């Protein structure tokens, strides 16, 4: 059975939830596995995601029609190349509104494109409400709730908070120690390059910590991809 | 069903008469209502450019063209006729229709007459309302607020708004929402009806490569206009199921 083209929408209506980190990790996962991708960064002012992958990530202003055309028209191309969108929290509402106005989900279904919202949880009550609104608007939209323990820790009430979200599918991004985080956040740092050839001047402790952290994340991505592929398989 | 004439007009230019006529033609075609259209923008008509198959260019002042429209109302297979008046020609067209006895025939129930009076964001445009009033006694008269140009129609000034809109007792209102400029211009370049653009077809029916985003905006816009037409019960008015109150 023909596989749908996946569109990962890394999003949250709030800042500092780790959406850009997830977009970046997903990108590194695809690069590490030798796969092509197309990325979009909807923060036209400080595009961190776009700046890290200038060859493959298009920076768009989702508030303009030109930006919407550059992004959504490409997202609807069924070419089996995964698309990753880092939705800036300030453009979240506009992004969702545009999806609605242009009939994005209907066209995605016709075009064999599978949008998946990687919705980033946080401890506010508005966050699950936004996720519920999204799920109510488009029940067919795949949704994974992402918890970034470093960027937006949920604390002791994590399981109660997560129970309020509409999807039981989860990604958990662990918290990095300070040294590894500084390394990961350095502008020139590439996780896929690091995994292939760690810099010789990097501390062994940092190296081990980053490897363990990355392995945990990549395993989740791989499992998700396998599960999604199996769900679409005709012979099962 | 008796023949129906839908006149789309305004004396003021640039208020979006032809856009409304095009949206109307698309709506009726989409509802499988056989429709013909007359474009009074002689010698070259914008409506004719977008709906060439159904549109004929006429000179409303010419007797032979008046005959072409009115004398065929009863005999034509197509029972709905849209007349898109060019700028400055609404009052003249209404006078011409009166002079040939069309309004008498409407009063006697031979024809249905619907007038879409497209308003612009100026006092001059609103002044047209009172000038039009004498002609619309037996018409289904609708004031069309075309928001394509971001007009507020003086809603921010209740005195002015009331002064004009309270004069039109019995008139319905229709709101044409704003369509993004880029989407509008892309349809303009394509030179095809809105529905054909949404269907990703060229003007001659071949597959096109129009932007999905722009098609989506046009589709949503058309959906809102269809809701407006449904709100006023346009199809019932045309079929005669709904009478003028």
Image (cartoon, coloured by chain):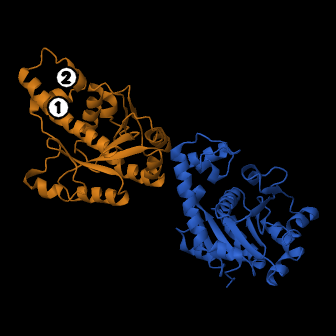
Looking at this view, is B215 or A188 the one in front?
A: B215
| Image side of residue B155 versus residue B2, left or right | left
Residue B177 visible within the image = no
Q: Secondary structure at mark 2?
A: helix
- State the image coordinates of residue B157 (x, y, percent, origin top left): 54, 70
Query: Can you tell which chain is drawn orange?
Result: A
Task: Find out whether the residues at labels 2 and 1 contact each other: C-beta distance under 8 Å.
Answer: yes
Which one is earlier in the sequence, the residue at label 2 or at label 1?
2
Q: Which quadrant does the C terminus of chain A fall into? A: top left
Badge 2, how many Cα within 10 Å: few under 14, some, many 20+?
some
Task: Find residue B124 and report its image quarter.
Answer: bottom right
Crowd band around label 1 with a 10 angstrom C-alpha radius: few (<14), some (14–19), many (20+): many
Residue A160 or residue B125, whichever sits in front: A160
Classify residue B161 as left or right of residue A81: right
Chain letter behind tag 2: A
Q: Position of residue B150 (x, y in %)?
A: 56, 57
Labels in figure, total: 2
**Rendered shade, chain B:** blue
Q: Residue furthest right?
A: B64
Horizontal relation, residue A129 to residue B170: left or right: left
Instruction: For marks 2 and 1, give the CA distance.
Output: 9 Å
Residue plotted at (67% across, 52% down): B193
Regarding residue B122, the answer to whether it shows in the image is yes
Q: Secondary structure at mark 1?
A: helix
Q: Quadrant of residue B210?
A: top right
Query: Which residue bears the numbered disc 1?
Result: A214
Q: Looking at the rendering, which quadrant does residue A100 occupy?
A: bottom left
Residue that carries the numbered disc 2 in the rendered image: A195
- From this view, report whether residue B154 is shown above or below residue A162: below
């Amino acid at each position: 059975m023909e596989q749908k083209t996946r569109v990962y929408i890394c999003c949250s209506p709030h800042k500092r939830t780790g959406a850009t980190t997830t977009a970046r990790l997903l990108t590194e996962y695809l690069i590490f596995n030798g796969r092509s991708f197309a990325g979009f960064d909807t923060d036209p002012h400080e595009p961190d995601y776009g700046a890290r992958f200038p060859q493959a990530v298009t920076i768009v202003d989702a508030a303009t029609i030109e930006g919407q055309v550059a992004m959504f028209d490409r997202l609807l191309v069924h070419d089996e190349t995964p698309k990753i969108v880092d939705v800036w929290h300030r453009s979240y509402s506009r992004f969702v509104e545009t999806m609605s106005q242009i009939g994005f989900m209907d066209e995605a279904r016709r075009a064999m494109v599978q949008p998946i919202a990687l919705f980033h949880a946080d401890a506010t009550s508005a966050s699950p409400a936004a996720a519920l609104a999204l799920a109510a608007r488009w029940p067919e939209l795949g949704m994974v709730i992402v918890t970034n323990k470093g960027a937006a820790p949920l604390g002791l009430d994590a399981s109660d908070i997560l129970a309020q979200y509409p999807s039981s599918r989860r990604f958990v991004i662990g918290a990095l120690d300070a040294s590894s985080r500084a390394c990961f956040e350095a502008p020139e740092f590439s996780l896929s390059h690091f995994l292939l050839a760690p810099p010789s001047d990097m501390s062994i402790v940092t190296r081990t910590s980053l490897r363990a952290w990355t392995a945990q994340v990549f395993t989740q991505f791989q499992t998700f991809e396998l599960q999604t592929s199996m769900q679409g398989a005709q012979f099962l | 069903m008796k023949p129906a004439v839908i006149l789309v007009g305004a004396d003021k230019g640039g208020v979006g008469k032809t856009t409304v006529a095009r949206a109307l033609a698309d709506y009726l075609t989409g509802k499988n209502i056989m429709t013909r259209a007359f474009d009074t923008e002689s010698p070259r008509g914008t409506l004719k450019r977008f709906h060439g198959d159904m549109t004929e260019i006429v000179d409303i002042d010419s007797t032979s063209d008046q005959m072409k429209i009115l004398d065929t109302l009863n005999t034509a297979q197509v029972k709905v006729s849209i007349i898109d008046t060019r700028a400055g020609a609404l009052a003249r067209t209404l006078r011409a229709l009166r002079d040939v006895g069309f309004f008498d025939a409407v009063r006697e129930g031979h024809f249905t007459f619907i007038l879409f009076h497209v308003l612009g964001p100026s006092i001059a445009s609103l002044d047209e309302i009172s000038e039009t009033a004498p002609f619309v006694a037996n018409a289904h008269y609708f004031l069309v607020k075309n928001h394509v140009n971001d007009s507020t129609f003086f809603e921010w000034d209740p005195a002015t708004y009331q002064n004009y809109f309270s004069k039109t007792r019995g008139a319905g209102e229709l709101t044409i929402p704003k369509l993004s400029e880029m989407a509008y211009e892309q349809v303009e370049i394509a030179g095809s009806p809105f529905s054909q653009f949404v269907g990703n077809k060229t003007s001659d029916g071949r597959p096109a490569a129009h932007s999905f985003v722009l098609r989506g905006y046009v589709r949503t816009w058309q959906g809102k206009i269809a809701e407006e037409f449904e709100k006023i019960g346009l199809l019932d008015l045309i079929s005669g199921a709904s009478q003028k109150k």
